[in-house]
Image (cartoon, rainbow, N blue to C red):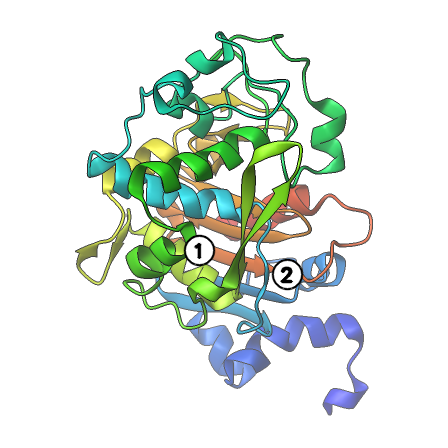
C-alpha cells in the first residue's frame, strides 16, 4: 500500500518502524511496539518518542535529535549531580539551610524554615513556601502559606526547593551546573547533542535562586535513562553512584497524582505494577525520561508544545503500563 493512501492513524502506527529504517515484518519479528502507541502519538503529539527494552528499540517516532526545553526534567538531572557530590563528601544531606547560609529576598526565611535540610529539599518537603522562579500557574495557585508546615512534614512540588538546590550545588562544589553535567554525566555516557551552552539560568527578582533550564534531544534523554536503568553505570563505569539512584527512586511521599510517589527529584512509579526502582523525570508539556528496571524498559519523550487537553503525565503513565503488560 503506498504511504499516500494511509490514514493518519495507520501512518502513526508505522512511524516507529519507518524511523528505524527496517521493513515492517522484520521489525515485528524483532520486537513489538507497545500496544496503543498509535493512539498515544495522536493524542500526545510528541516531537520525539523513543521506547527501548533490553537494549532494543521498540519504537522511534519523530526527530530524536531536535533539542527542546526539558522543563522540570532538569530536577532529575541535577539529582544525578547531587549523587556524585554527596558521595564525594562535598554536600551533606543533613546540612541545614542555616548552616549553608541559604536565605532569600524579603520576606526572608524564618529560623524555623532554615532548619530544612538538603534531604528535605531533595524530597520536596522543605516547608519553605517563598515565591520561586519558573513557577507554573498551578504551583502559584496551590502554594501553602508560609509557616504552615514544618520542614520534613509535608510534600509539595515546590520550585523553591528545586531552585535552592541549584544554588547549594554551585556554592558547595564551585561548579556551574551545566558545565558539571556536561563533564560528569553527558560526556561519560556518550550524549551526542548536549553541551553546556544548552543550559540557561532563569532569574526572578522575587527570589535569589534562579531556575536552571536544560535543552535536550530525545536521544540524549534516552541515554540518561539507560544510565539510570543500569543503576548509574555506563559501559562498565559507575557514572552516578548506584546506591544514590536506588535512594532517589524510593518513594518518600505519596502525591496527589494517583499512585505516584516522589523520591529525591524523581517521580516514583507504583512498585506493585512496575516493580521496585521504577520512576520517571517529567517536564511541563510532555517531556519525560522513564526507567523501569524489572522490565528493562527506557522511554524518552520530548514535546515542543503541550498536548491539547493536558493530562500529559497521566497519558504517559498509561503508555508505560501498556508497555510492561505487553
Depth order, front residue of 316/169: 169
Residue with the most extreme left position: 236
Residue 281 placed where, x, y %? 51, 45
Instruction: Classify 88 as above or below 157.
Output: below
Say if residue 179 shows up in the picture.
yes
Depth order, front residue of 260/125: 125
Depth order, front residue of 76/210: 210
Q: Residues within 10 Å of mark 1 (few under 14, many from 20)?
A: many
Secondary structure type for disc 2: helix
Please give left or right for residue 41 compared with residue 105 in the image.
right
Say if residue 32 shows up in the picture.
no
Front: mark 1 or 2: 1
Upstream in sequence: badge 1 or badge 2: 2
Residue located at (34% from left, 39% from top): 82
- Residue on which disc 1 sits: 298
Residue 72 placed where, x, y %? 57, 45
Tag on residue 37?
A: 2
Tag on residue 108?
A: none
Tell me the quadrant of the picture where the N terminus can be found. Answer: bottom right
Residue 213 placed where, x, y %? 55, 52
* Image quadrant in which you'd find residue 246: top left
Residue 279 placed where, x, y %? 46, 41
Residue located at (68% from left, 64% from top): 38
Amino acid at each position: 500500500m503506498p504511504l499516500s493512501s494511509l490514514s493518519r492513524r495507520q501512518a502513526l502506527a508505522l512511524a516507529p518502524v519507518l524511523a528505524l529504517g527496517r521493513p515492517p515484518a522484520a521489525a515485528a519479528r524483532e520486537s513489538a511496539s507497545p500496544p496503543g502507541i498509535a493512539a498515544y502519538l495522536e493524542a500526545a503529539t510528541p516531537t520525539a518518542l523513543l521506547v527501548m527494552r533490553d537494549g532494543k528499540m521498540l519504537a522511534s517516532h519523530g526527530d530524536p535529535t531536535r533539542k527542546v526545553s526539558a522543563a522540570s526534567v532538569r530536577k532529575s538531572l541535577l539529582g544525578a549531580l547531587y549523587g556524585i557530590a554527596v558521595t564525594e563528601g562535598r554536600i551533606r544531606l543533613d546540612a541545614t539551610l542555616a548552616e549553608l547560609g541559604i536565605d532569600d529576598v524579603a520576606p526572608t526565611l524564618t529560623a524555623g524554615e532554615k532548619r530544612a535540610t538538603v534531604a528535605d529539599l531533595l524530597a520536596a518537603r522543605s516547608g519553605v513556601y517563598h515565591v520561586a522562579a519558573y513557577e507554573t500557574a498551578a504551583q502559584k495557585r496551590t502554594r501553602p502559606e508560609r509557616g504552615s508546615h514544618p520542614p520534613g512534614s509535608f510534600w509539595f512540588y515546590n520550585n523553591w526547593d528545586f531552585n535552592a538546590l541549584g544554588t547549594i550545588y554551585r556554592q558547595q562544589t564551585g561548579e556551574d551546573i551545566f558545565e558539571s553535567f556536561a563533564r560528569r554525566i553527558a560526556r561519560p555516557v556518550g550524549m551526542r547533542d548536549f553541551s553546556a551552552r544548552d543550559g540557561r539560568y532563569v532569574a526572578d527578582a522575587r527570589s535569589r535562586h534562579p531556575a536552571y533550564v536544560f535543552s535536550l534531544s530525545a536521544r540524549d534523554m534516552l541515554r540518561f535513562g539507560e544510565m539510570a536503568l543500569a543503576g548509574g553505570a555506563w559501559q562498565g563505569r559507575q557514572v552516578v553512584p548506584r546506591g544514590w539512584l536506588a535512594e532517589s527512586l524510593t518513594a518518600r511521599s505519596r502525591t496527589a497524582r494517583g499512585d505516584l510517589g516522589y523520591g529525591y527529584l524523581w517521580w516514583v512509579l507504583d512498585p506493585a505494577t512496575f516493580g521496585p526502582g521504577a520512576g520517571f523525570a517529567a517536564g511541563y508539556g510532555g517531556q519525560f525520561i522513564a526507567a523501569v528496571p524489572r522490565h528493562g524498559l527506557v522511554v524518552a519523550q520530548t514535546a515542543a508544545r503541550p498536548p491539547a487537553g493536558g493530562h500529559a503525565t497521566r497519558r504517559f503513565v498509561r503508555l508505560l503500563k501498556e508497555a510492561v503488560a505487553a
